[in-house]
Image (cartoon, coloured by chain):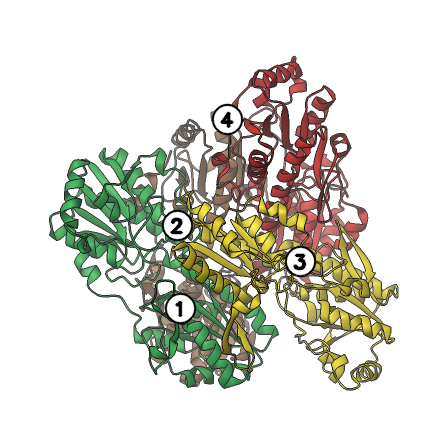
Chain colours: A red, B yellow, C brown, D green
């Protein structure tokens, strides 16, 4: 059997570890051949491939990113996309696909499965907002990077009288902000799931200043003030002609300065959060996802994806996992709020 | 209500984070007072205390170790130990205890509970071998430290022709070796649960040398060769008059050198694995254990301990958790073996 | 003799290590007493002090920031500032001062020396732009933090087709950008000493894209395009009523996107660069500066500051060190340019 | 012109960065071709080569180890070694050599230069014991790794009552122990240059225990007790028939336990110290050494090596640099001793 592998969506530490595990197990255990597809769904759509055998995956375990490249190409948005994929798979002699990706990539995988393509999924998102699995790889790495930055800011917080704001990833779900803020000892954590009240934030900030220790605010890029997102519009257009949404971190800095009369400084961690070598845990999870994905292929579990349940790897239907985002539970947010102010 | 807190057993990153979370929630939410007991069970046994209020726990989140100190004192091995503890608790006005520790400390807690002391437990072991919880804090930190060391050794492995052996913690269970070896890309992982065959190990080593890349062997301190532990006896007595058991890592180095004719080098990570600041995940877990432990006190869940199930914190009976060690499952070890040789 | 110590200017990893070394040597070797002044020159100006003895400096070596606090107070800008300082020193029985700081703090120290105050300086700036010393502590830490971020961005650069821009500290001198860019493998490094040509930058970026590997641009916050700083003005006013200068990193991102038609992403490292524990080298340098500073006090070398020359610590006159900034030499910048494009 | 490059001796972070810099500058600036020789002097001796051009050095900057491999082969210990090297260089059309290595490798280079081979050297040793240069690359990385380990041990030292011993590299010179011990806050540092008195060490240890904080002892692998090395002989023979010298770290542990009655634990960092990615400073130094080495080739500075003087790169005669080891100065050791006990 010949199995195709592709990686879609934003890059994420652990993608290469999944690819390596699939190949390292699939070749000797099942006698499979492997073919890498380039740049997500663009690969099978345009039949762009690269060979994948055991020598090709040597050294991949600790390497961030993906040797297969990635894209956000959606074959369902392209004329006869599904037909072209089916034809290419047939022409290349590829009998099954492992698709590694987030909501979008796995959503396509789920639909392709419905259209008769033999596909198994592996969930991936540093945002940790995929349903059906306790955690996704890449998330632990992103949180550790954010916590390391917050730890460093505490030093400045001890020596100066400034509000320090850290904007972390998380457009729809606040998992990174929640974990990093709780592990980093933040005085306020603002997440997309709960619209924040700028007056309340300033109260927390002021209460911290009274302890003679500067406040640290961790905010998801997708967090919004109560008054709505229109306050974040800058009016500028970017290179692609879209009206820019000013970063919520910068906006917070300006508002907190204006309301408290004390300086504020914003750090936007950006892509640093998704780069570099995966943590031990993310390598472990990615490796096990890879091993179980190829077992799922061997077992003919089409339309399923690997998932973490406690310390076990299980499989769940793709459509269940991609139906709705996993958001932060209010009870969990209330735990973090014990440390606000 | 006045609540006592103690930490027992070996030190472990995250202990301080538990203490901080208990106090930060217990004071404002429940109006409790807190008293720290020094050096594990020695504290309540000899009434050695230190005050614990909100200012006392400031800055504790990222700090490894335990501000309360620790010991392996067992009150059941001491004449009228239980009676003395009960009297001291009464004299100090302490109505409930939170005991943070491993198998021994929680075993004592469980027996004290049977003897009528109001106690809640928090599980702690870097070895991750406690039943009843998916993971314990400290484990993730230990694994990451070991993986960082293995990553560094890969550099030497690429440039020289030597077997590199890394001895990690784990006297009874191989969790650290298994996770670190799998995340570090080891060519052999030896754990206490499975007696190893030195000939098999040398075969893996030789097979790796044929790839022109030096082999890395990760071994738990408690792993044993098939021939039995007697081969590890050095004959020397240590300062306390016990016959020394030579480290299995050193023994492996000598045997592999003798059998392969190629140099071997052993690194014993030792206490470095349990020091330093906790990882983001361990801080998160320790903090949540602390929050849920004080909620368990408030709910009168005596004889219970906090536990991780998936992404949730639950409580389980102490006696269930301390009945038997959680060992590495053979199926899990077989997953790791995909990468041996 | 009673010796006062103060720290001025921005916080910097290693300040605490200097304080510790001064006290650890000064007490047993010379029998001195020490008094800490709070918040830079505000301390002696307003007689705000905190006691400093050997127990007070325990644990300070690895701690970033400064336990004495800091400020940018300038006694020469305050009515009778010098007179008040002299009187306070006399009233407090302080016979000598050690001033740890950058250009401003040491400039004040130099003038106070001319005015008859017995003062010894210790140079400090993460920007490394102080004359008279090969390096200052804090710089090595800042560069390592920036390089770690750049290393992470390389992962994304391998997987996506985007220009990645990293803005680092350095308002007047490009030392951090130069070292971090060179150690991080940047494709362009822009520093304040050399006005950059945006067309040339885009050429480097394009040449990198042709290698199928995304370009990384490291830019000092103080770097300026050839056309002058007016292009960076945003028109907005900040909370203090000043017209904001848009960050050069953000500006570069917009310009490069517009000119190359490919996405660009900017990371502004900000205060993360000056926080956290110092590197080994910064601890070593800070500790030795402290030891030699108190020796200079004992030797009566007033008006001098400690300095690094090769592997040796020497003393140089304060006024020499503060006369002009140490800028990046064009020959050194040319070395870095070998790797541009 | 065709230039050969080789790396000799133990591996060291930064070797690859030197190779990259030589090629990145040598090709476009001077129009040179490059040829890599494998495994130190074995390469030119046996004409084992690998091609080296700009694509071949891509990605090398952050990678530890050496893509050229290394060995301790000495052509002067081999029949007609020099003649064979000369002939091979001629046959391969190699007009000049850059030899990157430590005392042994550069000693050979110096003698080959005397024998008429056109060679330029680049100094390399993580031990930092080469004369003629302020520092060598690899040293900063080794020291940082050791300090990170010591930092972690402090956590245990705060919680338990044990002596913690860290054995670091340094067979003949104590530079790593000195820097790491001083930056890590060790209570005793033992180096090869000064025979230690075990009674004095135990005194420092006991004095630390009186502060209720466990002592940390940093010891070079080459440090010796006053009574001589015979106390370290274990009587065992290793796989190659040599009588083993027991590690000084283990010996210290046993002696301190026996004399103080308190447990001691030894960590031997071993090869972890020379692995992994170089620090920012080592990358900077290695890169600049590479750039200046190829400039030295272009200038015909045969028999010279690159060296660091302050913040400048200079060249010095190879024979000067390899005449005698650079040992720790007693005055410098006295600075460290301020913190003993």
**Image coords of residue C78 (percent x, y):** 50, 65
What residue sits right under mark 1 in the picture? D177
Q: Horizontally, is C155 left or right of B30 in the view?
A: left
What residue sits right under mark 4 in the picture? A50
Distance (Cα) linking label 1 and label 3: 32 Å
What residue sits right under mark 3 in the picture? B283
* Residue C92 visible in the shown view: no
Q: Which of A47 and D1 lies nearest the eye of the viewer?
A: A47
Dot 1 falls on a residue whose secondary structure is helix
Q: Which of A246 and C74 lies nearest the eye of the viewer?
A: A246
Of circles 1 and 3, the one toward us is 1
Marks 1 and 4 in Cβ contact (< 8 Å) = no
Of circles 3 and 2, the one toward us is 3
Residue B121 position by quadrant? bottom right
**Image coords of residue A198 (percent x, y):** 73, 47
Q: Are marks 4 and 2 on the same chain?
A: no
Residue drawn 47% across the image and 33% down it: C214
**Image coords of residue D248 (percent x, y):** 41, 73
Q: Are marks 3 and 2 on the same chain?
A: no
Dot 2 falls on a residue whose secondary structure is helix
Callout 1: chain: D
Q: Are marks 1 and 4 on the same chain?
A: no
Of circles 4 and 2, the one toward us is 4
Distance (Cα) linking label 4 and label 2: 42 Å
């Amino acid at each position: 059997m010949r199995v195709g592998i592709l990686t879609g969506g934003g890059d994420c530490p652990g993608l290469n570890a999944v690819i390596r595990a699939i190949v390292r197990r699939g070749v000797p255990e099942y006698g499979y051949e492997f073919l890498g597809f380039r740049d997500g769904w663009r690969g099978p759509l345009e039949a762009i491939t690269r060979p994948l055998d055991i020598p090709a995956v040597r050294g991949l375990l600790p390497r961030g990113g993906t040797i297969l490249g990635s894209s956000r190409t959606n074959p369902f948005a392209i004329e006869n996309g599904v037909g072209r994929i089916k034809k290419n798979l047939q022409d290349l002699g590829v009998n099954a696909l492992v698709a590694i990706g987030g909501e979008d990539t796995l959503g396509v995988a789920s639909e392709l499965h419905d259209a008769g393509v033999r596909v198994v999924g592996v969930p991936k998102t540093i945002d940790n907002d995929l349903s059906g699995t306790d955690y996704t790889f890449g998330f632990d790495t992103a949180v550790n990077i954010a916590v390391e930055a917050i730890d460093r800011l505490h030093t400045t917080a001890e020596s100066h009288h400034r509000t320090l704001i850290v904007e972390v990833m998380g457009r729809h779900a606040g998992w990174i902000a929640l974990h990093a803020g709780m592990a980093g000892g933040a005085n306020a954590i603002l997440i997309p799931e709960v619209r924040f009240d700028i007056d309340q934030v300033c109260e927390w900030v002021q209460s911290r200043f009274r302890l003679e220790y500067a406040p640290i605010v961790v905010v998801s890029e997708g967090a919004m003030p109560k008054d709505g997102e229109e306050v974040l519009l800058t009016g500028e257009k970017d290179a692609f002609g879209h009206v820019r949404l000013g970063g919520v971190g910068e906006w917070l800095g300006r508002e907190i300065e204006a309301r408290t009369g004390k300086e504020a400084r914003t750090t936007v961690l950006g892509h640093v959060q998704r780069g570099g070598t995966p943590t031990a845990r993310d390598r472990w999870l990615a490796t096990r996802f890879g091993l179980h994905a190829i077992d799922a292929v061997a077992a003919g579990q089409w339309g399923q994806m690997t998932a973490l349940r406690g310390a076990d790897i299980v499989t769940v239907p793709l459509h269940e996992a991609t139906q709705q985002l996993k958001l932060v539970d209010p009870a969990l947010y209330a735990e973090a709020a014990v440390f606000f102010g």
